Amino acid sequence: MDPTHFVHINTGSPEPIYRQLIEQVRRRVAAGQLKAGDEIPSVRELAQALAVHPMTVSKAYSMLEADGVLERRRGLSMVVAAQHQGAQPTADRVELLRPTLEQAAAEARQLQLPKAQALGLFKDILDQDAP
C-alpha cells in the first residue's frame, strides 16, 4: 500500500496526529476500504511519507492493535485484523461519524449560523470530490 495515500493529517488541527491516524484507519476499516489481511505501511514508511516522528505512528499502530483493529506479525508488516472481513453495518459507521458532526454542530451554534446555511455547507462539502 502506498504510504503517501494511506492517511492524511492536518497539522493545523487541535487533534493530535496519532489520534488523526487512529480515527482514519478505523474509518477505512469500518467502510470496508481496508479488509482483513490487508497490509498497512510500516511505521518507518508512514512516518517518512507524513513527515512525522516514527514514535507518533508507532503509538497509533499500538493503540489500533490493542483495540483489535490491527494485528502484528513478527518480522512482517502489520495487517488488518481477521475479524474485519468487510464494511461494518451502516448504523455502526454512522456512530463513528456522530462525534465529528456534534463538534461541527457546536461550532455552527457558536458562530450563530442559520441551520439551513450550515446544512447547505455540509451538503456542498459532501458533493465535492474527495481529496
Image (cartoon, rainbow, N blue to C red):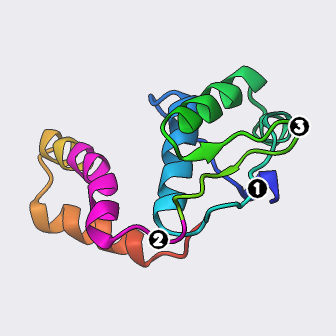
Q: Which residue is mark 2?
A: 87
Say what secondary structure mark 3 lies in: loop
Please, is residue 115 above or below residue 48 in the view? below
Say what secondary structure mark 2 lies in: loop
Task: Give me the disc on residue 75.
Answer: 3
In the rendered image, residue 114 lying in the magenta stretch gets the answer no
Quadrant showing the C terminus: bottom right
Nearer mark to the viewer, of 2 and 3: 3
Apparent side of residue 63 relative to residue 8 in the rendered image (left or right): left
Q: Is residue 61 visible?
A: yes
Q: Which residue is mark 1?
A: 39
Residue at horizontal 86%, vertical 43%? Answer: 76
Majority SS type along the magenta span: helix
Please, is residue 20 above or below residue 114 in the view? above
The span picked out in magenta is 85-103
Apparent side of residue 62 relative to residue 22 in the rendered image (left or right): right
Say what secondary structure mark 1 lies in: loop
| Observer-nearest of 46 and 130 | 46
The image position of residue 47, as x and y in percent, is: 78, 34
Residue at horizontal 54%, vertical 47%? Answer: 69
